[in-house]
C-alpha cells in the first residue's frame, strides 16, 4: 500500500513533493534542521515562531520515518508534533499528525488503531470547521470499513 493513500495535488493536478532527493540527502537535511533547532531551543522555546518551526520539523520527520518504515521514530515524532500543536492550538497540524498515525496504522494493518485516530481527527476537524480535512478523513473512515 502506498504510504500516502490520498496524495495532495496542486492546482495543475501534479503530485506534490516529487523532487528526487536521495535518501542520504533527506537524512542529512533532517539531521541538520534538528541540530539547528536543538541549538536554538533553550533560548527560544517559549517563542511562538520557534514552536511553529519545531512543529513543522516534527511533521517532516514523522512523514519521512513512517514512509521508510521506521515506525517507532515516526510515531514518536507524530505524537510530539500533536502535543506541541495542541499547546499552541494549531488544529491543522494536530490533524496532520493524526493523519500520519493513520497512515502508520494502515501500513501496519492495525484497523483498531486506525479507527481510533480517524475518530479523533474527524471530531477535531468538525470542531474547527476544517471541511477539506473532514473530506480526507471521511474517505479514510470509509477505507477503514473494508
Image: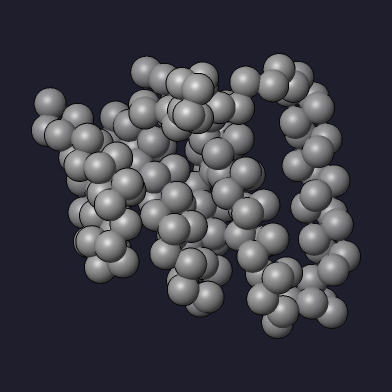
| Residue 101 visible, this orientation | no
**Residue 43, picture quadrant:** bottom right
Does residue 53 sit above or below 106 in this rendering? Answer: below
**Residue 112, picture quadrant:** top left
Q: Quadrant of the N terminus?
A: top left
Q: Which of 129/48 is in front?
A: 129
* Horizontal and vertical percent position of residue 11: 48, 29
The residue drawn where x is 67% and y is 61% is 54
Q: How many marks?
A: 0
| Residue 136 visible, this orientation | yes
* Horizontal and vertical percent position of residue 16: 55, 27
Does residue 19 sit above or below 76 in this rendering? Answer: above
The residue drawn where x is 58% and y is 49% is 59
The residue drawn where x is 75% and y is 31% is 26
The residue drawn where x is 72% and y is 79% is 47
Does residue 92 sit above or below 132 in this rendering? Answer: below
* Horizontal and vertical percent position of residue 105: 34, 37
* Horizontal and vertical percent position of residue 76: 53, 52
24 sits left or right of 8 in the view: right
Does residue 1 sit above or below 81 in this rendering? Answer: above
Q: Residue furthest left?
A: 145
138 sits left or right of 100 in the view: left
Q: Quadrant of the C terminus?
A: top left
Colour treatment of the image: one colour
Amino acid at each position: 500500500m502506498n504510504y500516502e493513500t490520498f496524495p495532495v495535488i496542486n492546482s495543475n493536478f501534479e503530485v506534490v513533493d516529487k523532487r528526487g532527493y536521495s535518501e542520504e540527502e533527506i537524512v542529512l537535511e533532517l539531521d541538520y534542521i534538528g541540530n539547528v533547532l536543538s541549538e536554538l531551543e533553550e533560548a527560544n522555546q517559549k517563542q511562538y515562531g520557534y514552536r511553529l518551526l519545531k512543529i513543522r520539523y516534527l511533521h517532516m520527520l514523522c512523514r519521512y520515518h513512517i514512509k521508510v518504515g521506521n515506525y517507532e521514530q515516526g510515531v514518536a515524532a507524530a505524537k510530539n508534533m500533536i502535543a506541541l500543536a495542541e499547546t499552541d492550538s494549531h488544529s491543522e497540524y494536530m490533524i496532520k499528525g493524526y493523519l500520519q498515525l493513520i497512515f502508520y496504522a494502515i501500513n501496519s494493518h492495525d484497523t483498531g488503531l486506525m479507527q481510533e485516530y480517524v475518530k479523533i481527527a474527524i471530531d477535531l476537524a468538525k470542531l474547527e470547521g476544517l471541511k477539506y480535512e473532514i473530506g480526507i478523513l471521511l474517505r479514510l473512515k470509509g477505507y477503514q470499513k473494508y
